[in-house]
Image: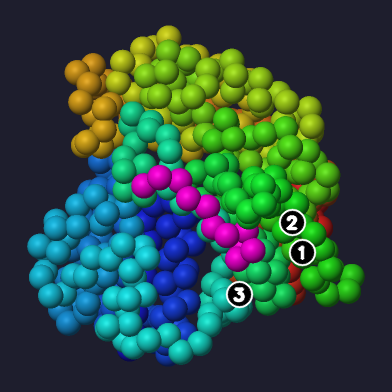
């Protein structure tokens, strides 16, 4: 049996897709392109109206690529509107919740015969390995429907996370990325009054893997994926500072807007001033910090003055990378129903302006780091990814997966 994985959306989807692929490989299947695949797993996204369109297009493409393939549709879009996908090709399209994908694959291929944690390293998977520790979200941003698709926030058993991360380190993973839909809300109650938050989990993972490495080589490092500003505690900052780079001094901290008025209308639980205060605290405790972010341009009701505030905040925060999103209406969200939508041309123009600033800030961050030394992870594509998330050409002769010092 041949299979193909089509992944759309966030880093959590990427981690889930890697797990689906690992399970299929462990069943004796071979990964191929969609045209030759007996099974195509499409892990969908529905965060915006544009993402929803791309998802439907991806499923239709998989159906056309091979008339005999089975298409397993999972992820957020499948959770919101399963019938729409099933109707595309009844009998060929199998809609599965993220916890039911293995059950559908069991029916199509057969049951899993062995564990597959070790397959995540060195068998065609990226050298940077993601581990999902949290799912769901208790927030309700007015532009977002993911909290409906994913449900309430849940956290994985800390013991299971620790066991998986140690196994990955022992299998050769040099960078492990902790992911979640709302990662900073991680909270595991182990009983007897012991509650482990993200800072405690990070410290436990550092301790578990401190001695899991070859002599003369640095221990594996951890990277925190996107985390909401309200969830960055003083304890988490302290754990990062004490780790001396074993927790990458890089955070993806979504701003979304630099206007306090717009943030309130987005139902974001902070003001622009509070966001900047957090950034200043982070830079004070972690001077080497690289800070990336998400910003939405053209949210309903956003004025020229609101947008200028966003540009000003972005400059003061010295972001090393900005993911720019022109606002895209997602049916079913409060923001999509507003009558004060910003014209598409204006959204596009503001996005161009912000991307130009983002390019300037990234270049400035790179120049500020010139001559400094950082540990870099050597990727399969000949790229060395630094702790601060800058790319350099990988040194010749160094195998993918190595963690080595480089000079920016």
Q: Quadrant of the N terminus?
A: bottom left
Q: In the image, which is nearer the foreground, mark 1 or mark 3?
A: 1
Please tell me whether mark 3 or mark 2 is closer to you in this view: 2
Number of dots carrying numbers: 3
Circles 1, 2 touching at the beta carbon (< 8 Å):
yes
Taking depth in this image into account, of 43 and 58 the one nearest to the observer is 43
Q: Is residue 389 in sight in this rendering?
A: no
Point out the stretch of residues depicted in magenta. 151-161
Q: Which residue is mark 2?
A: 204
Q: Residue at x 46, y 60 (%)?
A: 14
**Which circle's residue, 3 or 2, is located before the other in the chain?**
3
Circle 1 is placed at which residue position?
208
Label 3 close to label 2 by CB (< 8 Å): no
Mark 1 Cα shell of 10 Å, populated few (<14), some (14-19), many (≥20): some
Q: CA distance from mark 1 to mark 3?
A: 19 Å
Taking the spot 66% from the left edge, 26% from the top edge, the residue there is 279
Taking 228 as reference, is 115 above or below it? Answer: below
Figure check: 395 above or below 392: below
Residue in view at x 80 percent, y 71 percent: 213
Q: Is residue 105 left or right of residue 313?
A: left
| Residue beneath disc 3 | 121
Question: Residue 287's spot in the image, x, y percent?
Answer: 79, 33
- Residue 5 in sight: yes
Q: Disc 2 on helix, strand or loop?
A: helix
State the CA–CA distance, disc 3 to disc 2.
Answer: 22 Å
For the residue labelled by badge 1, is the local secondary structure a helix, a strand or a loop? helix
Residue 121: x and y in percent read: 61, 75
Check disc 3: other Cα within 10 Å, few if <14, some if 14-19, many if 20+: some
Does the magenta-highlighted stretch encompass residue 156? yes
């Amino acid at each position: 049996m041949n299979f193909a994985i089509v992944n759309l959306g966030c880093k959590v989807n990427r981690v889930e897709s890697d797990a689906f692929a690992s399970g299929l490989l462990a069943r004796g299947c071979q990964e191929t392109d969609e045209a030759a695949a007996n099974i195509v797993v499409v892990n969908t996204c529905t965060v915006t109206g544009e993402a929803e369109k791309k998802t439907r297009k991806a499923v239709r493409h998989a159906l056309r690529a091979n008339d005999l393939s089975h298409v397993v549709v999972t992820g957020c879009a499948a959770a919101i509107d399963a019938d729409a996908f099933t109707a595309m090709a009844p009998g060929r399209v199998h809609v599965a919740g993220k916890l039911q994908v293995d059950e559908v694959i069991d029916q199509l291929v057969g049951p899993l015969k062995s564990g597959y944690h070790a397959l995540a390293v060195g068998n065609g998977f990226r050298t940077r390995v993601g581990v999902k520790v949290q799912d769901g979200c208790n927030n309700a941003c007015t532009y977002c429907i993911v909290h409906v698709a994913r449900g309430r926030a849940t956290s994985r058993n800390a013991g299971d996370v620790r066991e998986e991360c140690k196994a990955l380190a022992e299998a050769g993973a040099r960078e492990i990325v902790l992911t979640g839909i709302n990662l900073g809300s991680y909270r595991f109650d182990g009983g007897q009054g012991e509650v482990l938050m993200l800072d405690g989990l990070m410290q436990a993972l550092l301790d578990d893997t401190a001695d899991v490495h070859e002599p003369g080589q640095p221990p594996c490092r951890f990277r925190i994926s996107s985390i909401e500003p309200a969830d960055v505690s003083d304890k988490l900052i302290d754990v990062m500072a004490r780790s001396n780079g074993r927790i990458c001094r890089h955070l993806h901290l979504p701003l979304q807007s630099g206007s306090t008025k717009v943030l309130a209308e987005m139902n974001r639980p902070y003001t622009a001033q509070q966001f900047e205060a957090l950034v200043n605290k982070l830079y004070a405790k972690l001077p080497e910090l690289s800070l990336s972010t998400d910003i939405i341009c053209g949210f309903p009701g956003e004025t020229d003055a609101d947008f200028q505030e966003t540009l000003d905040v972005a400059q003061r925060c010295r972001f090393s990378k900005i993911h720019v999103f022109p606002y895209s209406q997602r049916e079913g969200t409060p923001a999509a129903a507003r009558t004060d939508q910003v014209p598409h041309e204006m959204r596009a123009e503001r996005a161009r302006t912000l991307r130009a600033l983002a390019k300037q800030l990234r270049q400035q961050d790179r120049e500020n780091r010139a001559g400094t030394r950082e540990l870099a992870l050597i990727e399969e594509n000949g790229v060395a990814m630094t702790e601060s998330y800058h790319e350099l050409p990988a040194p010749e002769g160094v195998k993918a997966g190595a963690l080595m010092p480089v000079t920016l």
